[in-house]
Image (tube, rainbow, N blue to C red):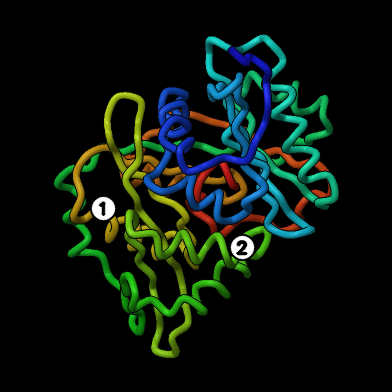
Amino acid sequence: MNSEFTIRPVQPVDIPVINDWARREGFAPGSGDIGIYRQTDRQGIWTGCLGEDPVGCIAGIRYNHAYGFIGLYIVRPDQRGRGYGVRLWREALDHLHDVSCVGLEAAENRIDDYSNWGFQPASATTRWQLEIDSRINQIRSLERPEGLRLIHGDDIPEPKVQIYDADRELNPRPHFLSDWLHHPAGVVTALIDSQQDCHGFARIRPCLLKNEAGWRIGPLLADSPELAELLIMDLLSARQGLVIMDSPGSNALAAPLLEKLGFKAVGRTLRMYRGVMPSRQLDEVYGLACLELG
């Protein structure tokens, strides 16, 4: 039997295996997420194999020459400590070697490791959790600002959402965002004015928690906490179960809003960058699309 360790681009057959690894690690993968990562950069997500047996994975997604992101970094527990993780890590770094800024989310026990590779701390990212209950019906009493409409699905003017996102995120991500908005597993809502301009948008999708199915909100961008609240309540109004969301520490208004809505902080990672540190603050980003792609 061939037991040589090799690294190859992820294939569709790998996705259920990687989803299960990610679920066990507590990453809470959303339905369709890994397929979208693969579409964003077909050369930027890999499986490590012993012979034909998958034992690890990593994503090193290149958005463009200015920005990339590393995530989905997993080695199967029974194969750790054998150097496979380092080889996957080098594969991702090599793929992004000429990208000006590379980001990642670091678990607390990995911060020193990433620092040794030249990554610098930026801000904490908090994972929030809420058990959806009847309080969500409060959406009926929320006042919607005059001139704004809540629009869903295909009625949303995607070009306006793309502009809104590019003006607030660290880097434009048109291909990723288009796939993210249109994937059938998710539901998207947006606040649109009479000129068809966007004032906030959000997406919810099913996800795999460690012991159950749940929901994951992200991205969530809005002009204000009040509009972010409208979007959250709209997404949760017809759903039951556990919902999670990841908020960037650079938005000081996110935590008070989520606490007000009953979310509890259940985890924290550290956003780190290597290369040119981003100058833009994510101060109108209330929820990240995913920790694996920034």
Which residue is drawn at the image coordinates 41% and 35% (left, top)? 16
Q: Residue 230 appears at what percent x and percent y?
A: 33, 63
Depicted 25 relative to depicted 191: above or below: above
Which residue is drawn at the image coordinates 78% and 58% (left, top)? 66
Tell me the residue that label 2 is attached to.
173
Depicted 17 relative to depicted 94: above or below: above
Q: Give residue 57's quadrant in the image.
A: top right
Q: Which mark is residue 15?
A: none
Question: On the picture, is 64 further left or further right than 238?
Answer: right
Q: Residue 39 appears at what percent x and percent y?
A: 55, 55
Q: Give residue 64's quadrant in the image.
A: bottom right
Tell me the residue that label 1 is attached to.
236
Counting residues from the start of the chain, the first of labels 2 and 1 encountered is: 2
Residue type (three-letter) at the residue carrying disc 1: Leu
Report helix, strand or loop for mark 1.
helix
Question: On the picture, is 36 further left or further right than 216?
Answer: right
Depicted 286 relative to depicted 159: above or below: above
* Structural crowding at the residue carrying mark 2, measured as other residues with C-alpha within 10 Å and reported as few (<14), some (14–19) or many (≥20): some
Q: Give residue 275's quadrant in the image.
A: top right
Which residue is drawn at the image coordinates 60% and 21% (left, top)? 51
Asked whether 22 or 102 is in front, the reply is 22
User: Which circle, 2 or 1, is nearer the viewer?
Assistant: 2
Q: Residue 62 appears at what percent x and percent y?
A: 70, 52
Residue type (three-letter) at the residue carrying disc 2: Arg
